Amino acid sequence: MIDQEKIKEAVRLLLEGIGEDPTRAGLIDTPDRVARMWTELAAGYEQTAKEPLSRIFPVESGEMVLEKDITFYSTCEHHLMPFYGKAHVAYVPDGKVVGLSKLARTVEVFARRLQIQEQMTGQIADAMMEFLKPKGVMVVLEAEHMCMTARGIKKPGSKTVTICTRGVFQDNEALQTRFFQMLGK
Ligand code: ZN
């Protein structure tokens, strides 16, 4: 559960830590705003992908389904800075498919937590395998990390790409190539 009072106290301390005055007019409501923002950014801790991935429909086709360019915003657990970009989620159904908006909901469940991009990629793939039980899953995330672009080495526009394959996608070059063809890359 999210403890709003703790977050507010932490933000006041952070402001003092950087030499600011948390009581000045421009900052007086900031701890409260930040606490409310975090209830949204950390909402994924109280959710699982079971709910969205249970809305299934039977199909006969065993052709790959790809939902691409799912925009997501997450928070890097090393710096508490945003990383954001696109998720591309594909699977080969085994008799059932899930509503397309539910793949976006699944990405959201894992994005709304403190994350490492590699871990998030695997969590999406594993949730798909666990709840939808397709023949295989392939997930690609491409994201810009503010901790890299706004500080440190400062390379705006540079992207980190992570990939995770499960089931029939593993070690299957033809299927992976088809994924990237459908992605248009
Ligand atoms: Zn970071």
Image (cartoon, rainbow, N blue to C red):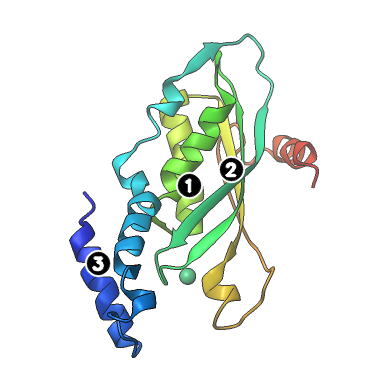
Crowdedness near tag 2: few (<14), some (14–19) or many (≥20) residues, C-alpha within 10 Å: many
Q: Position of residue 167 (x, y in %)?
A: 54, 33
Q: Nearer the viewer, mark 1 or mark 3?
A: 3
The residues bearing labels 1 and 3 have C-alpha atoms spaced at a distance of 32 Å
The residues bearing labels 3 and 2 have C-alpha atoms spaced at a distance of 36 Å
Say which amino acid is labelled 1. Gly
> To which quarter of the image does residue 18 belong?
bottom left
Which residue does the numbered mark 2 point to in the structure image?
139
Q: Are marks 1 and 2 in contact (CB under 8 Å)?
A: yes
Work out whether mark 3 precedes mark 2 in sequence or the reverse, and give the earlier one. Answer: 3
Asked whether, in this view, residue 5 is left or right of residue 147, the answer is left
* Secondary element at image label 2: strand
Vertical relation: 45 (above or below) 175: below
Vertical relation: 181 (above or below) 150: above
Q: Position of residue 61 (x, y in %)?
A: 67, 13
Which residue does the numbered mark 1 point to in the structure image?
122
Say which amino acid is labelled 3. Lys
Say which amino acid is labelled 2. Val
Which residue does the numbered mark 3 point to in the structure image?
8
